[in-house]
Image (tube, grey):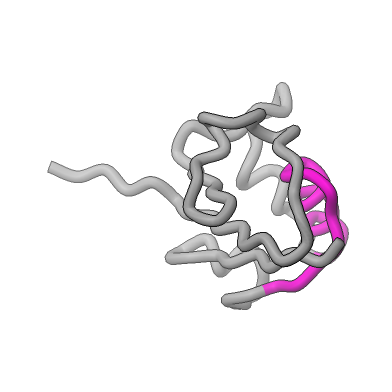
């Protein structure tokens, strides 16, 4: 199933400056795996060594945070939009 993956902000560097990438994946974990095959180092930027999402990375499916779903095992449907954002803190 084809999904659209959007990288916003400084994370675009991880995928060679691409804004939007179309790929086939059934879960968020599958998206990260496919991206890492195309752009080496994606996994290191998005995941902790134990395989959980970095706390400063936010991933949304159709504007819903995966942390409130099944996290990396959240299922995808054809046409879903996955947005990857680096959290920014300030004060």
Q: 77 or 23, which is in the foreground?
A: 77
- The vertical placement of 59 against 47, above or below, is below
Rendered location of residue 82, percent (x, y): 62, 57
Rendered location of residue 14, percent (x, y): 63, 62
> Which image quarter holds the C terminus?
top left
Rendered location of residue 35, percent (x, y): 78, 59
Tell me which residue sits at (70%, 53%) in the image: 42
Tell me which residue sits at (77%, 52%) in the image: 31
Rendered location of residue 69, percent (x, y): 59, 31
Answer left or right for 26 relative to 21. right
- The vertical placement of 67 against 82, above or below, is above
Tell me which residue sits at (48%, 53%) in the image: 63
Find the magenta span and give its range: 21-38
Q: 72 or 18, which is in the foreground?
A: 72
**Most distant residue in the left direction:** 91
- Looking at the magenta stretch, what is its main secondary structure? helix
Q: 42 or 78, which is in the foreground?
A: 78
Tell me which residue sits at (66%, 29%) in the image: 70
Q: Residue 30 lies in magenta, yes or no?
A: yes
Q: 17 or 2, which is in the foreground?
A: 2
**Most distant residue in the top direction:** 50
> Which image quarter holds the N terminus?
bottom right
Answer left or right for 10 relative to 53. left
């Amino acid at each position: 199933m084809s999904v659209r993956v959007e990288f916003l902000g400084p994370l675009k560097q991880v995928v060679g400056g691409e804004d939007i990438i179309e790929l086939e994946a059934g879960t968020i974990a599958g998206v990260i795996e496919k991206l890492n095959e195309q752009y080496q180092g994606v996994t290191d930027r998005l995941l902790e060594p134990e395989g959980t999402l970095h706390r400063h990375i936010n991933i949304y499916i159709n504007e819903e945070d995966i942390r409130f779903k099944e996290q990396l095992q959240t299922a995808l449907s054809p046409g879903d939009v996955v947005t990857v954002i680096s959290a920014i803190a300030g004060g």
